[in-house]
Image (cartoon, rainbow, N blue to C red):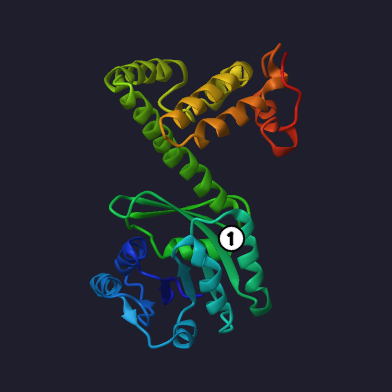
Amino acid sequence: MADRPTTAILHPGQMGAAFARQARRNDVDVVWLPTGRSAATRERAEAAGLRPVPDIGTLVETSLVIISICPSNAAEDVARSVAGQGFTGTFVEANAIGPERVGEIAKLFEPNGATVVDAGILGAASTRMRFYLSGPAPGVSAVARLFDGTDVAAIPLDGGVGTASALKLAFALWQKGARALAAVSYALADRYEVAERLCAEAETEADAEAERTGRSPFSSPEGYVLPAATRGWRWELEMDEIAGSLDATDLPDGLPRAVADVFARWAPLKDRPAEDLAEALALLRVGNRDAPRPA
C-alpha cells in the first residue's frame, strides 16, 4: 500500500470534512461521492478540497482506503454498498456503533479479503481530534500515516476490531450521559426554585471530589467507584424517590431508575467493602441483576 493512498470519505458531513481537510494537508488525494448529497455537503466537500467521483463503483476502484463517517443508523448500508462493489482495500468503520455491530460489518468484507479497521473519533471537529484505531496492525498503521503531523491524533490501540468502538461508546456515555443527568437534576431544582443552591453545592462537591480522587472520575477509578459500590445498596431507594419526584413534575424519570438498577447490583457488598475494582465491576453484569437485596 502506498504511504498515503487515495482515500475516500463516506460521507463528508462536518466531521468527515474536517478529517478530509487534515488528510489533504499531507497531500492525500481524498475522493467522495456527491450523488444524492445535499448542497451543504457539496459546499463542505469543495471547501475541504475533495475530488468528486461519479458513482460508488468508481469510488471503490479509485480508493485504497475508505473511511465511513456517517449517522450510526446508516453504518451497515454504507458498508454493504462498498463491500458489494468488491472492495479489497482498507475499510475504516469510524461510526458511533457498538463493537458487536462493527464485528458484523467486518464479516461483510471477508469474502473480498479486505482489511477492516475499527475507529473511534473523540473530540469536536473544531478541536484536535483523537482518532483511535484497532484491528490488523498493517491497516492501522496505514490509516494512521494519513494524518501524520495534522490536527488528527491517530492513536493505535491493542486489540482487534471492536476495541476502538468500545472506547468511543464508553467515553460518550460518560461525557454525554453526565450532561443529561445534570440537566434533569437542574430542572428538578429549578422547579422548586433551589437551582442556585444546587449549583453552589455541585461546585463544593466537585472541589472535594477532586481532592479525594483527582481531576475526574477516571483519574482514580478505584477511589471513585469503590466507595459508591460499598454504599450503593443504600442509594437504590433514594433513586426511587428521585424518580417519583421527577415523574410528579413531568420530568424524565428513566435516569434515576437506571441508576437505581446499578446500585441494586451492588447489594452483595452491604456488609463489606469490595475487595477490588474488578469485583465491583463484575457485579454490574446482567447476570447479577437478580442478586438478593439487603434486608
Whether residue 66 appears in this view of the structure is: yes
Residue at left offset 34%, top offset 67%: 20
Closest to the observer: 230 or 181? 181
Where's residue 117, x and y in %? Answer: 55, 63
Where's residue 68, x and y in %? Answer: 47, 67
Q: Is residue 246 above or below residue 197?
A: below
Where's residue 213, x and y in %? Answer: 47, 20
Count of residue discs: 1
Whether residue 226 appears in this view of the structure is: no
Q: Which residue is mark 1?
A: 137
Identify the secondary structure beneath mark 1: helix
Q: Is residue 193 above or below residue 113?
A: above
Residue 126 located left or right of residue 67: left
Residue 116 located left or right of residue 15: right
Quadrant of the snapshot with the C terminus: top right
Closest to the observer: 1 or 122? 122
Q: Quadrant of residue 195?
A: top left
Residue at left offset 47%, top offset 28%: 217
Residue at left offset 43%, top offset 33%: 181
Furthest toward the front, the residue is 248
Q: Amino acid at mark 1?
A: Ala
